[in-house]
Amino acid sequence: MTMSWLSRLNPRGPGTRTGRNAAPSGLCTADPETCLMVFQNHWRQVSWILEQREPSSSSDDLTAVRNHTDQMLCLLAEERPGDTPDMDTSVSPMGPILELVVTENILERVVQWHIRRGLDLDSQGALLKLFEMLIGQSHQPLLQHTAVLHPLLRILGACGDPELGCPAALENSLVLLLNQVCVTMARQPVVLELLFRAAPAQHGSTNLLIFSLLVPFIHRDGAIGQQARDALLLVMSASATHEAVARYISENSYFCPVLATGLSALYSSLPRKIEVRGDDWHALRQEDWMGVSSLVLFMNSLEFCNAVVQVSHPLVRTQLLDYLHNGFLVPVMGPALHKSSVDEMIASTAYLDLFLRSVSETSLLRTFLRFILLHRHDNDTILDTLLTRISSNSRLCMVSLSLFRTLLSLHCEDVMLQLVLRYLLPCTHVMLSQRRAIRETDLYGKSANKFLSLIPECCRQNTPPSTDREDDTAFWGKALTSPSSESPAPHRPSTPSRLSFFMRQQSAGSTPTSSSSSSTQSTPAAPDQGHPLSPDTPASQQTFTECLEWDCGYLEYLKDARKGIEFCSWACRNWSAPYDGENPSPSSAPSPPPPPTSNPSMALFPEHFSIQGSSSSRSDTPPNQRAAIVAAARSEWSSSERDSGEWDVTIGKNSCISLTPRSKKRSLQREELPPKQVPPLVPSSAASTANAAAHAHASPGPRVPASAITVSYQPLLNGTAAQNDSQERGLEVKKVKRDLGEKRYLDENANQNGAVMKCTPQTCSVFGNDVGEGKSVGAIEEGNQSVESLIEELLEQAPGESPCPAETNGQGISIEAFTQELRELEDRVKERQSAAAAACKPDDALREERQTQQQQQHPLEEETGTTAGGADGRGDAAVVGLCSPARPLNQPVSQPYTGPFMVVLFTKLENMLQNSLYVNILLTGIVAQLASYPQPLLRSFLLNTNMVFQPSVKSLIQVLGSVKNRIEAFAASHEDFPVMLRKAQQYLVARGRVDWSDLPSVPALRRSDSLVKSRKTSLGDLILRHTNSPTRARHAAQMALAHVRDGGQSLHSALFRTGGGGAGAEKQAEALRVKNAVYSSVIFCEFLKELAALAQEHAVTLPFAAHNPGPEE
Amino acid sequence: MNLNPFWSMSTNTSRKQQRPDNDEQSAHGDHRSSPARLQFGKKQLPAIPKNAVPITKPSSATTSVQSTNGTHASYGPFYLEYSLLAEFTLVIKQKLPGIYVQPSYKSALMWFGVIFIRHGLYQDGVFKFTVYIPDNYPDGECPKLVFDIPVFHPLVDPVSGELDVRRAFTKWRRNHNHIWQVLMYARTIFYKINTAEPLNPEAAVLYEKDVQLFKSKVVESVKLCNSHLFDQPKIDDPYAISFSPWNPAVHEEAKERMFAYKRRPEDQHKGTQVSGLSWVKPGSTQPFSKEDSSSQS
């Protein structure tokens, strides 16, 4: 999704109006003088009624006035401006009718009459529509005249009742009119100034009435929300150069906080659990979320934020970004990413990934990245937390890998610095004598050769007897047209990346020349065939056939590598330094954080999603035992699923989400909701009783005063939820440690925000939900204070009759209720201006945050006696951000360490054989992505196989060597390995073909673009619907399906040709282990070719000159 | 690699002229691969022709590559090809003044080049030359450099036109010696004349004994070379460097393109407007150490 908002605005301009123009234009094609006469005639009759002493209540009068006004305004709208002597249209004289309207103040008098009479909904609506027509269709600028502007503002003011807000019946007309005004304003910037100055008497509270009227609709669903956002955006762009208006928006309006906290509210309504059936699912694509209304709503608002950041005045932009950081990312996203349930981790990680991919504005992206890299939640940066999850064995790993792929694809120096480069900068990982070699490229293909040499013999010597040989050639040849019956009809895959290579391999192998295999022809495709030496020599023939097996496709790898490297070095052209081992200088580089003593990334998240993971983490257990564990895990999984989630989300075909309440509390609440909120949130009847206990914990007593609220969460976290999880799922829940210093700051912040955001009880339906859920789910976010304190204030104000305020909450998120509250909020803004202003200075807040961190840091530093990192006296707050708090006490600082990212990737890579196919595809993709970076430090570390590292540093080539040995050992112990290998290859080739058949025109970019594009599957396929079927059955079905998708069946049949009856869990687990190993062998070989190609291409890539420095362009 | 458009254009024209020759030549065995190649040549020079490994020297090259690169002989051509390509990349990176080279269409082991001499005794000289790289590169001898027309110079063989490169590279050491150094050397000899152990004793003697005569001989030689500038390339190759008189209709546009040219990644996809992000202050290694310029503009 590229967020180009403004382009979308255009169609709603004058063009769409033509339809409506038709009627009146027929009426007034007469000459101007006639029109004026008709107008005067109408006006005479209207003014006669208006001038009556006591306002008549007669409906006849009303009807008459309305009819005449209709006619008059039509005439006014149709009137052309007077003849212009100049080309300058802005000074064209008024037409006669407009002149009359201005001099007699006609509109004002009509509106006054209506108001004196008492406006009923009906005539109010009629007036709104009338003005909308007038402004939308007029041929001359009207709003520049106070005779038009003031009555307009009067009408608008009547709609914006401070207490009640706009009556629902008028909303559409109101927003449409406001939109129209904003369109006019965008064309005539003068109008903004006039609107800004013309503070209407009765609404002195807000200078920019149209603005405050629009704000409540920001997060509204459907067309009305869209119109409001469009209109606001027009205000934003019109005010981009208008300092006073921008200042007003940022200081006197509630625009930015509403936008940011609105995101928070919308986020809390997103599904907590993304249930998908494919084993390969790992990221949210547009097709996935288009059908999820809550996500669409969120993405609309995020897109809007993106657009506002794009067009608005720097003042507004800065404020919005700060609010997004402090009001959405820190209090909502941070805790969400730290939820203790794996499902929620998966969901929040996938969301974050989606957000990062969707944001296009650099400064908004910066806000997100700063949050990920620097913000500390519970003492760890978000980045640290995300890194540890790569080592999990579940879908969580895949989702996390996908997020990192997104991060790497940004080619952001700051990200790369934190992830990898800062660990390599000191060059302590290389032997001193080798530092010079950092900049060397693989000039003579030595490294490439080394990588290729790691292709195991067992994968290379795939030469079966000649009969088989023929069969094989046939396969390669005919694969294009009909998949052979033994390879299962491949399901449309969703993890394309590397699979594309198989497609290529095939296409390279099955070009007409080669499939006809007339060996007298030298095929250009064969890499070793380029020589015009006599093609009939046996040698060449031999290499030719060998090429079919495993050589071909190498040229494609080279091509891909070139594209990847070129693009990457182009994208990095504005980086601050070349990172070549000299600049930045290794001696001046601050020592990076050392490795944690105990590797937290290990076994933090037991495998959870599919059984294939479980076999991997326990490679030390004997096979039998492992199988038993797997079986146990499975049964546990299926039984626990029933009551594990507190929050079930079902997405039906009609794309409505039903939230299945897990406690009675929610079902009770539901009854108290206004009926209109029910439809989109259909509660499932399958309410679980198992959560009675959780319910008991989750419903607290009467609310405690504000300052205590954060504390009150604590027992809940360590109690209910943690218990739930650890008991039912065997999860090790990371306990939330609260640092006092940090909390002090947070509380302070909370109070500040709370003071600003005073709300009435109705808002509870928005935020209260979050409270209830947060509790039952058990992950309490300390960063949540701003929202929490808001809630708290709401609760404080809650009417006494509600015994338990939390229970008044709806289980659904009501945007209506939220926006309604915003209106009230806004009225209070004025009173709280100073407080708001204080809250608007997040730089201060940030500074404070850093100070707090520093305070935390220093004691630690003193204890350990280390002098590195933050203690280097400069007092640079950012330095603190670099020190891992997890620094072990007795760790020598100088121990070379390549950072958690490399360590976790290498560990995962070393265990390749146990990983699922999809994990390996993502994993090797990320390593290849890293290896595309042109920075010599990184390139030499990954690709220079001649480099000598310090003994404690593991090199990629070592890791790969170890994988090679494992594959060879595996192959040696499975005599049918060659057969299985070929079947796996066949499946992957076939699957690659399916993958690419849809994208004939985009063969190039596999990991970035094609990944996005290649998922055509509809949401319904991806997010499994909760049907009424028993969990167990559903899960079983899911498992079965996964096997089919994996092509597991063909492998199974290959494996268990003799096995026959004993289809026990052990057998299945063993089959899975074998399957993973065979697939990894295939991936491994391809990966080696890819790395070799990258090493070669780096030597021939020219650097790009930096353009004008600056993050943009 | 991405060569500048000027050369690609000039070679294109030369190829057009030569297509008949090519066809004739096809009888000699270039037949099968040429159609595919011509397609590529039309747009731009492919760094490596996509479908074909360029014709490196026959069997001897292959065997030597196999021996040097160990077990994976089938990738051998790639290594040789890429080594040469890497050398070429180094040449481009060096930005040698007044020197332009272009690998041959037929073999990566043969490079065409031209040197423009901008001052000194040989001022205004435009010398075309060919570099021959031994097929056991990088383990063999140093490359040969032969001028199309034997320039009057102590170190240039008056008959063959070969430059005495070996005196500068007594032993060719991989990783230390690169082809750009040979080119650099070829340029240096025109500015700093060395008469020791000459290939052209006459030139050496004259330089020592009668500089005036030497100078006039040089001027003559430069004139001669320049008068043959528009000749057909000495070696028949589509990528041979050929000159043609300035023709505004053709060259003006090419020149403009050259100056306006901004190199972009070959396959830049659209949706990546956000890239090359950096908020690191130069000299710092802290993330977000730079002020966010976008919020201040």
Image (cartoon, coloured by chain):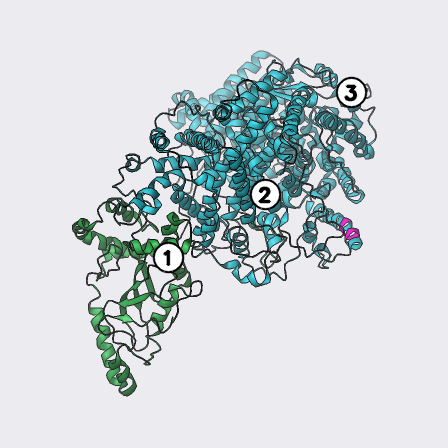
The residue drawn where x is 53% and y is 24% is: A1042
Identify the residue under disc 3: A693
Identify the residue under disc 1: B84
Label 2 chain ID: A
- In the image, what residue type sits under mark 3? Ala
Q: Which of A928 and A22 is in front in this view?
A: A928
Q: Chain B is drawn in which colour?
A: green
Q: Is residue A608 above or below residue A679?
A: below
Identify the residue under disc 2: A905
Q: Is residue A966 above or below residue A635?
A: below
Helix or strand or loop: what does disc 1 sit on? helix
Disc 1 and disc 2 on one polypeptide chain: no
- In the image, what residue type sits under mark 1? Leu
Q: Residue B113: which numbered mark, if any? A: none
Tell me where residue A950 sits by quadrant. bottom right
Label 1 chain ID: B
Magenta stretch in the rendered image: A856-860
